[in-house]
Amino acid sequence: DNKGHPALKSLGAVAGDAESYDIFAPLFDRLIESRHGKIPSESSKCGRRSLTTESAEPFGGYVISSKVSASRNLEEFPFPPAAARQDREEVEQIIVQSAAAMEGSLRGQYYPLAGSRSYPSKPGGMTMDEEKMLADDHLLFYHPDAPAVLSTGAGRHWPHGRGVFVNERRSLTLWINEEEHLKATSQQTGGNVQAAYVELTDVLAHVSSKLPTGFARSRRLGYLTSNPANLGTALRVSVIVKIPLLKHCK
């Protein structure tokens, strides 16, 4: 019913939980193969041992920052498109409790979205000053407004059960109940992608160790996300690069 935006391509379906990928495999397998290619019998493993030592900054002075993100869902909960309000609030509580136990450079603070009443320590959510601070640092996420995204249920119960955990150094953010249960992002200055990846894997390992059953994962498909375009490693790497002579090109 919702054709989406002509300039934004999507697969047109989302998974309500981990079992959806087995129960509706004839549908999801075709969608996944259209984006990722043939599905292997077992997903490949991605870890520190396979991490390249090559720098993202071969010439020096051009890469402003490097960012590595990972999306994860908790094993025994419905994914955000099918989650009830209580599900979202339970996921929020579990992840925040785990994040609050992190120490050292990962220690930080949780900011429930403004207007949220699901986090008892901050009824009403973050203050206007906190919201501005996170927005100015580009660490905040917002209510979806695209009809195709809203039709997946991504905006249901907004803003309850949602928020942002940020460490003191501002290098780590955890988005809770945005598109997935958890989106963890590590950002480093310069081209040190490896440092961002190492920090990210430390955080995911810590959070996973506190979960009753871990993150939702399939032997065939890897880590499971509601959006089939993102499953597998569910990682995204990006760099911000300055190209000073670009303005002179015609």
Image: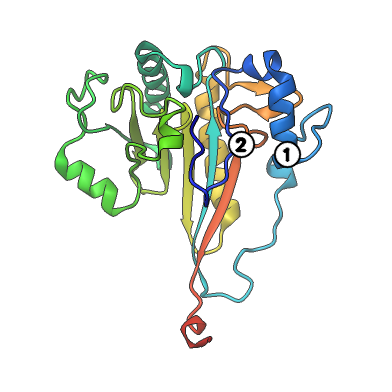
Q: Which mark is residue 34?
A: 1
Horizontal arrangement in the rendering, residue 250 relative to residue 116 (left or right): right
Marks 2/1 in contact by CB < 8 Å: the verdict is yes
Say which of 46 and 182 sits in front: 182
Q: Which mark is residue 11?
A: 2
Mark 1 is surrounded, within 10 Å at the Cα level, by few (under 14), some (14 to 19) or many (20 or more) other residues, namely: few
Q: Residue at x 55, y 21 (%)?
A: 209
Q: Residue at x 53, y 24 (%)?
A: 73
Tell me which numbered mark, 2 or 1, is placed earlier along the sequence.
Answer: 2
Horizontal arrangement in the rendering, residue 163 relative to residue 16 (left or right): left
Q: Secondary structure at mark 2?
A: loop
Q: Position of residue 216 (x, y in %)?
A: 60, 21
Q: Which mark is residue 102?
A: none
Horizontal arrangement in the rendering, residue 174 relative to residue 132 (left or right): right
Residue type marked 1 = Ser
Mark 2 is surrounded, within 10 Å at the Cα level, by few (under 14), some (14 to 19) or many (20 or more) other residues, namely: few
Residue type marked 2 = Leu
Q: Position of residue 91 (x, y in %)?
A: 42, 18
Say which of 215 and 220 sits in front: 220
Q: CA distance from mark 2 to mark 1?
A: 9 Å
Horizontal arrangement in the rendering, residue 214 relative to residue 187 (left or right): right
Q: Is residue 98 above or below residue 188?
A: above
Say which of 101 and 179 sits in front: 179
Q: Secondary structure at mark 1?
A: helix
Residue 205 found in image quarter: top right
Report how many numbered discs are placed on residues in the image.
Answer: 2
Residue 238 found in image quarter: bottom right
How are the colours assigned in the image? Answer: rainbow
Q: Position of residue 19 (x, y in %)?
A: 63, 14
Q: Residue at x 61, y 36 (%)?
A: 11
